């Protein structure tokens, strides 16, 4: 494989409105493999970049598994594996099983939300080419970046750079691998 | 009001919102860099302020007392405490309910206020969440120490053991393990997920190698990318939605530990909502007790303005009135029930050997908070601190009254008895305060105590900050 030496080309902006406008332009221009970087969650940025979010579905599944698993555990333990007659009450006294079913539904959903929100983003990931970009530490302060990645089908060093220049950024830099 | 953050020449621009609050939350000239600097410098600077060291030293001494008390408990057993029959639930359970109640305000602030788009929560939610974690940790230890043989605590958990036994899932005490365990887990996930972007901010600001490595490791490689933010925000919102019913369920389950029993004074249907209101009441009092000194020592009046204190005082006051209503209904129902044992319990609770404690409770939890009708007391950090402190004391006493006065005289006079705490009971209580404070001081020193990314958001969209 002939891997390109650079990871992508990044443009730096001063405000989140500029970044969202640039992202919309880039998407309209046909770029798909790109990412925006901002010091806080910018409304509409992910949509402008065409990012999909399947996290809620996973969390729903996690909650359902937690809930059914919890109820099954209680039923199996108190009805099948270790039945005790307490005051003649039915072994399968389902109302008493509800609190734990609820707690385990929440636990299953919460664990899924945590693990998948990081995992789907590829975290933890100690090294990433973007950290090579000078000034990138300002992405956690007051700078907004748009990086078009070299893996993109329409990526071509010269034309991509020209396109980014047309967006009037503060500066443009190559991101090395 | 928030004059500290607005330069004198900008005073004219401070408009009042319809509710009378100054509409500028962050001040007109605060920039992204200011927010980053004022929060992350607390973590990154070399020396902590002298007040931090003094507080840390006090907390450390109390923690050592806790270790001593727990060690002696493990060596000698439960006999060192004042518990016996009939009062088999003493300080340990009182402390447990008190601590877990304190934790509830953190979740309330971070989850429920988030869902209600109350952006004023931003400056206090991180601190309140940390408080939740540490309070729940203190709470969780109490019933474990009360087990008698704490080293086999895992018998409480459902797992296929060699004895062939399972926990009894029809018992509220088993519900409690799941409720508190889930609560602790969800709180820690919520807290850490919120911290990740801020840890990345600290990593980017750090200049020392060990700081870069330490915060870089904890930040998990966060890059502030649109992808990260999108999932982060979704997960954060979902966790808030999950934590909201959870926080209501936890103290309800705790109250069922009492309410399911047949004992007069415990067997009451009002317990779940009454306990939840009490939990939020004491929790907000604790948040105020922490936030007021912290904002003074670290000069955070810019970010935690008096408006925040006023809002917190209002929530504390509202829940305090609900709790007062709970006291009234408890007394009314025991009279109205016509049940001789219920009536007897109430008479003895108020006029019996522990009667004076009941009146201290009324003073701290019902009378003193009435001063909060006055705006001047709500907005003055000093008076608010004192009221909140008394509320905390009062809420501890409330649990003492519920646990001890109900147990000490039940149905037959031959089973009556009395209860007095021993030195080790007190050492465990104050020691657990030491554990709590120790964790809190370490948190303030090592991690950003105000959400930096959410504060940046307020800089970007001042309209959000000003909306109430």
Image: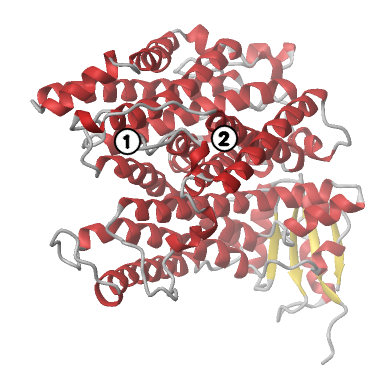
| Chain ID of residue with mark 2 | B
Question: Same subunit under labels 1 and 2?
Answer: yes
Which residue extends farthest front?
B414
Q: Secondary structure at mark 1?
A: loop
| Residue at the image point whose x is 37% and y is 39% from the top | B88
Q: Position of residue B223 (x, y in %)?
A: 73, 59
Q: Position of residue A79 (x, y in %)?
A: 24, 72
Residue B118 visible to the viewer:
yes
Specify the label residue B428 is tagged with. Answer: 2
Residue found at the very far bottom of the displayed protein = A1
Q: Secondary structure at mark 2?
A: helix
Residue depicted at 52% across the width and 57% down the height: B234
Which chain is home to disc 1?
B
Question: Would residue B406 be found to the left or right of residue B442 on screen?
Answer: left
For label 1, the residue is B86
State the residue in front, B64 or B291. B64
Query: Is residue B315 among the parts visible in the rendering?
Result: no
The answer to which quarter of the image holds residue B367 is top left
Q: Compared to B216, does A62 lie above or below?
A: below
Counting residues from the start of the chain, the first of labels 1 and 2 encountered is 1
Is residue B128 positioned above or below B401 on the image? below
Q: Nearer the viewer, residue B243 or A15?
A: B243
x and y percentages locating residue B41 in the rendered image: 81, 36
Q: Is residue B246 above or below residue A49?
A: above
């Amino acid at each position: 494989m002939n891997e390109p030496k650079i990871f992508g080309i990044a443009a730096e902006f001063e405000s989140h409105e500029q970044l969202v406008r640039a992202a919309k332009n880039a998407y309209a221009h046909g770029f798909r493999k790109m990412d925006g970087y901002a010091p806080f969650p910018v409304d509409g940025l992910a949509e402008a970049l065409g990012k999909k979010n399947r996290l809620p579905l996973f969390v729903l599944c996690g909650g359902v598994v937690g809930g059914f698993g919890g109820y099954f555990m209680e039923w199996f333990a108190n009805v099948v594996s270790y039945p005790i007659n307490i005051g003649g009450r039915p072994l399968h006294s389902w109302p008493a099983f509800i609190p734990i079913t609820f707690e385990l539904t929440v636990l299953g959903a919460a664990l899924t939300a945590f693990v998948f929100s990081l995992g789907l983003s590829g975290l933890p990931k100690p090294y990433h080419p973007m950290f090579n970009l000078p000034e990138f530490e300002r992405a956690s302060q007051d700078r907004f970046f748009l990086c078009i990645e070299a893996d993109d089908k329409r990526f071509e060093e010269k034309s991509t750079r020209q396109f980014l220049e047309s967006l009037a950024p503060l500066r443009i830099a190559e991101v090395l691998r | 009001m928030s004059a500290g953050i607005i330069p004198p020449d900008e005073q004219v621009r401070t408009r009042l919102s319809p509710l009378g609050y100054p509409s500028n939350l962050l001040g007109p000239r605060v920039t992204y860099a200011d927010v980053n600097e004022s929060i992350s410098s607390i973590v990154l600077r070399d020396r902590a302020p002298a007040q931090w060291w003094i507080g840390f030293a006090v907390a450390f001494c109390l923690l050592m007392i806790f270790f001593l008390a727990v060690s002696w408990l493990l060596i000698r057993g439960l006999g060192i405490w004042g518990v016996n029959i009939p009062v088999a639930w003493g300080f340990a359970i009182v402390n447990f309910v008190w601590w877990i109640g304190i934790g509830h305000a953190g979740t309330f602030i971070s989850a429920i206020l988030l869902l209600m788009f109350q952006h004023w929560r931003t400056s206090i939610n991180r601190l309140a969440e940390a408080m939740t974690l540490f309070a729940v940790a203190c709470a969780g230890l109490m019933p474990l120490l009360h087990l008698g043989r704490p080293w086999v605590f895992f018998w409480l958990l459902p797992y296929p053991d060699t004895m062939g036994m399972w926990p009894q899932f029809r018992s509220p005490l088993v519900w409690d393990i799941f409720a508190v365990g889930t609560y602790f887990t969800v709180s820690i996930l919520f807290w850490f997920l919120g911290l990740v972007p801020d840890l990345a901010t600290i990593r980017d600001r750090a200049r020392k190698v060990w700081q870069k490595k330490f915060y870089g490791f904890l930040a998990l490689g966060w890059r502030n990318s649109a992808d990260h933010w999108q999932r982060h925000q979704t997960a954060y919102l979902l966790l808030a939605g999950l934590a909201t019913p959870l926080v209501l369920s936890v103290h309800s389950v705790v109250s069922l530990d009492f309410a399911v029993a047949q004992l007069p004074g415990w067997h009451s249907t009002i317990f779940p909502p009454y306990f939840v209101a009490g939990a939020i009441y004491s929790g907000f009092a604790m948040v105020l007790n922490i936030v007021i000194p912290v904002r003074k020592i670290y000069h955070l009046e810019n970010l935690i303005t008096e408006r925040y204190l006023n809002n917190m005082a209002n929530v504390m006051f509202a829940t305090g009135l609900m709790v007062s209503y709970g006291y009234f209904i408890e007394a009314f129902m025991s009279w109205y029930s016509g049940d001789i044992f219920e009536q007897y319990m109430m008479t003895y609770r108020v006029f019996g050997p522990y009667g004076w404690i009941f009146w201290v409770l009324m003073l701290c939890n019902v009378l003193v908070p009435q001063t909060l009708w006055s705006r001047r007391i709500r907005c003055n950090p000093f008076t608010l601190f004192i009221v909140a402190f008394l509320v905390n004391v009062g809420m501890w006493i409330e649990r003492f009254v519920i646990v001890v006065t109900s147990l000490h005289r039940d149905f037959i006079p031959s089973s009556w008895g009395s209860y007095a705490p021993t030195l080790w009971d007190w050492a465990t209580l104050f020691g657990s305060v030491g554990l709590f404070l120790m964790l809190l001081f370490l948190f303030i020193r090592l991690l950003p105590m105000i959400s930096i990314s959410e504060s940046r958001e307020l800089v970007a969209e001042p309209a959000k900050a000003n909306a109430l």
